[in-house]
Amino acid sequence: MTKAGSRFAPGLAAGRWIFAAALAVAIVASGLFASLKNGAGLFYVLCGAAAACLMAFTGREIAAAFGHAAGRAGSAADLAKSARFWEAAARNAWVLGAMGSALNFTIALGIGSESIADIGNRMIGSFIVTLYGLIAAVICLVPAIRLSGRAASAGPAGPAPGPGRAVSPDRIAGYVLFAAVIVLTVLLLGGGQPQGGPLPIGRVLFHPAAILTVIGGTVALALFLGAGAQAWTYGFALTGLAGLFMGLIQALFGFVHKSIAEISSACAFIISASTLSLLGFAAVAGPLEDREILEGRRDRPSPLSRLFWAIFPLLTFIFLILTFLMVVTPMERTVK
């Protein structure tokens, strides 16, 4: 790149972001997608993803990643670290988007209503949070891909940093903010409405069988595998998949037996298992793998980890749709 080109590069990068922001504002102002608005879900995805990034990256590293995305020059090692941040941000947004739909779905089922259409509309609205996560993930992947290319063209990254990052205030703040975002999101989505729906929130979020399957199974697999942070990713993914299919099989038996109680129990198990697995990805497995890479113990996430991070949220979305159908169909039969 010429000196003139390098001098105008930051301005061009800023211009691209300004144009994209103006386009987004215009789309929102047009009102074409008014039915896709979910303020609490948007707050959850953006703030939750930012808090999850703080669990692995320091504030200085995050600021540098934004600077490099805007066109600032840097060494190959710094550009690679910034690319890693944006990839982690994309992963967090996608995972938390699916998890937000599960949480929203749970709250929609827990709020009582005499109208099937009212409950159905709330459940359908929960899927919007996954859409927010997908859009945020795509946006974050753009600088990740660009910075990876710049890092590769800048030459070798140099010696890896030494292992053993101390627990930083940024990491502590990340976990505190993440917990605060979850609590605030639940309160905002609930809106203080009384419980009385087909599946109370407590029954879903604190499902003993799902907790034993996902948390207990993940710990057991991590102890057996002993492959560092990757073991936690594999554990949450495999136990979550087992939980999804176990719940689906139980629901099918409920349909055969024409038992609403069995179907409700199966739906609670599916939602709880998927929520716990996604929470494990966002708060445990993802940050641990990021820190291993930043400490130089691993070059990049394993292909299998990336596959699980991409596929499991999508499977959660699909199973939530199946849960929606399973919940609404028995309710219609009882009303008729």
Image: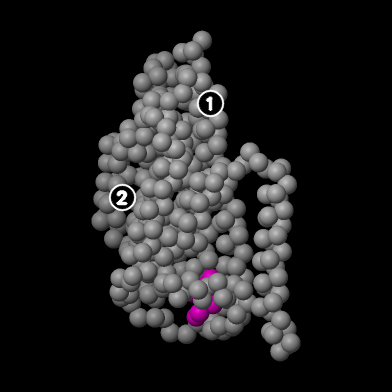
- Residue at 49% across / 68% down in the picture? 85
Q: Is residue 261 above or below residue 170?
A: above
Disc marking residue 153: none
Disc marking residue 218: 2
Q: Nearer the viewer, mark 2 or mark 1?
A: 1
| Quadrant placement of the N terminus | bottom right
- Residue at 46% across / 68% down in the picture? 300
Residue under pointer 1: 118
- Residue at 71% across / 64% down in the picture? 19
Which amino acid, mark 2?
A: Thr
Q: How many marks?
A: 2
Stretch of the chain drawn in magenta: 77-83
Quadrant location of residue 222? bottom left
For this rendering, which residue is in front, 106 or 147? 106
Does the image show residue 38?
A: yes
Residue 173: percent from left, percent from top: 36, 64
Asked if marks 2 and 1 touch (Cβ < 8 Å), the reply is no
Q: How is the image coloured?
A: one colour
Residue 121: percent from left, percent from top: 55, 30
Q: Left of 270 or right of it: where is 117?
A: right
